[in-house]
Amino acid sequence: MVKIKMKTPLVEMDGDEMTRILWKSIKEDLLEPFIELKTEYYDLGLKHRDETLDKVTIEAAEAIKKYGVGVKCATITANSDRVKEYNLKEMWKSPNGTIRAILDGTVFRSPILVNNIKPYVNNWEKPITIARHAYGDIYKDVEMKIEGKGKCELVFTDENGKETRELIHNFNGEGVVLGMHNLNSSIESFARSCFNYALDIKEDLWFSSKDTISKKYDHTFKDIFEDIYNKEYKEKFEKLGIEYFYTLIDDAVARVIKSNGGMIWACKNYDGDVMSDMIATAFGSLAMMTSVLVSPEGNYEYEAAHGTVQRHYYRYLKGGDTSTNSIATIFAWTGALRKRGELDENEELIIFANKLEKASIKVIEDGKMTKDLALITSYKNPLVLNSFQFIKEIRNELEKIL
Ligand code: NAP
Ligand code: MG
């Protein structure tokens, strides 16, 4: 069989623990036999990040800017336990945070649907993609406990020293206050990433906030989205027959539940944090969630939404059997390969990516799956496979349809 050739490399970012083990297996069994893989490899495994003083993460992000497409394995975010475990020189920042800051991107998370895992909301037929604004609001707030009587004000001092004041509250007793901010530039990037991604996957874009109560803060989000939509995207949306729809967050929640899915739901930072967990759980399993970071310039980084599955890795290290689901990691690869194919007009690569997804879904729908899915499937007596048998089954299926 002649292997598919790639024109331009994609950025490959290796990672940690169980997902690093799966990564190797996916490449060897599902990709390299069929594609002459052209990747620029960056090892974001914690050991190598430490050796390079985390420069490798920055280089990987720069490479995504250069090539436009990257695929990333899950990585450990260092904490004090990891500092000891890996004898780290520093408690390195989250690689995802670093890459997101460099690309100024927005993360889109979508579930992968199979016919024998039913969403808890039974009218959901298509995926619901959550886009979370990842800057500011309560995640960068300043808080104060008020001990007793007194007034609390918001004060803005401009660069010439001129003050603008707003009374928050005259306190008569104990209470709490918080100050938070956002930046128009960040909201604009968020909006553009969302509009671009909607055009990309040809789905409606919903955006929600609490503008009726928050007449300046949330209203600014609403206005920026509307303004950018009208000036830069309206025509393109109309041409594709998709729509941009703004509604109040309460109304959005009610409508999402009653919908059939198939839209992107853009959320402010906190709403996105909460709603993405709700959506992931309601669709069935974190192991079936994909995630893509899209920059306003149109750079793409694909990954699984889950972590490095540490508990399985320790079992694996002790020689125990694991049944770790590789679907989201496989779909990170297919997402990146398809995007590479689109950008390079490489039809063969696009077809391959689609077939690999089809084969993966077929295996599960035929009742062969990892343990996490076996626990929630409606399929009677599924065959539970270990991590590697599952990938081998997908290989068999893929060979049948190639
Ligand atoms: P996790 O890796 O997502 O795993 C949590 C649990 O969810 C697992 O123990 C497992 O449950 C289940 N699970 C997740 N993915 C699965 C899969 N593919 N197949 C089967 N079961 C799966 O989260 P964590 O254990 O809290 O975090 C581990 C490390 O990942 C941490 O160091 C964290 O910093 C990192 N992390 C990285 C990313 C990223 O790179 N994007 C995201 C999140 C977390 P059972 O054990 O019950 O089977
Ligand atoms: Mg959350």
Image (cartoon, helix red, strand yellow):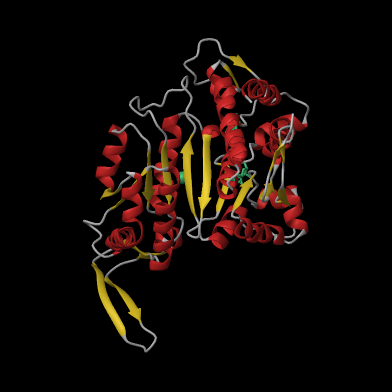
Q: In what quadrant of the picture does the N terminus appear?
A: top right
Q: Quadrant for residue 398, please give it.
A: top right
- The correct choice, above or below, for 361 with respect to 347 in the image is above
Residue 208 lies, in percent from the top left, at 30, 50
344 relative to 304, above or below: below
Going 36% across and 29% down the picture, which residue do you hit?
124
Seen from the viewer's position, the closer of residues 368 and 198 is 198
Is residue 299 left or right of 122 when viewed as pictured?
right
**92 relative to 361 in the view: left or right:** right
Closer-to-camera residue (76/293): 293
Q: Is residue 266 above or below residue 376?
A: below
Residue 206 visible in this rendered orientation of the protein: no
| Farthest left residue in view | 212
The quadrant of the picture occupied by the C terminus is top right
The image shows residue 45 at horizontal and vertical percentages of: 72, 48
Q: Nearer the viewer, residue 173 or 219?
A: 219
Give the x, y percent position of residue 151: 27, 73
Quarter occupied by residue 90: bottom right
Q: Is residue 125 visible?
A: yes
Q: Is residue 325 left or right of residue 200?
A: right
* Residue at 30% in and 46% down: 243
Residue 83: x %, y % from top left: 71, 53
Q: Name the residue at 59% across, 22% down.
A: 371
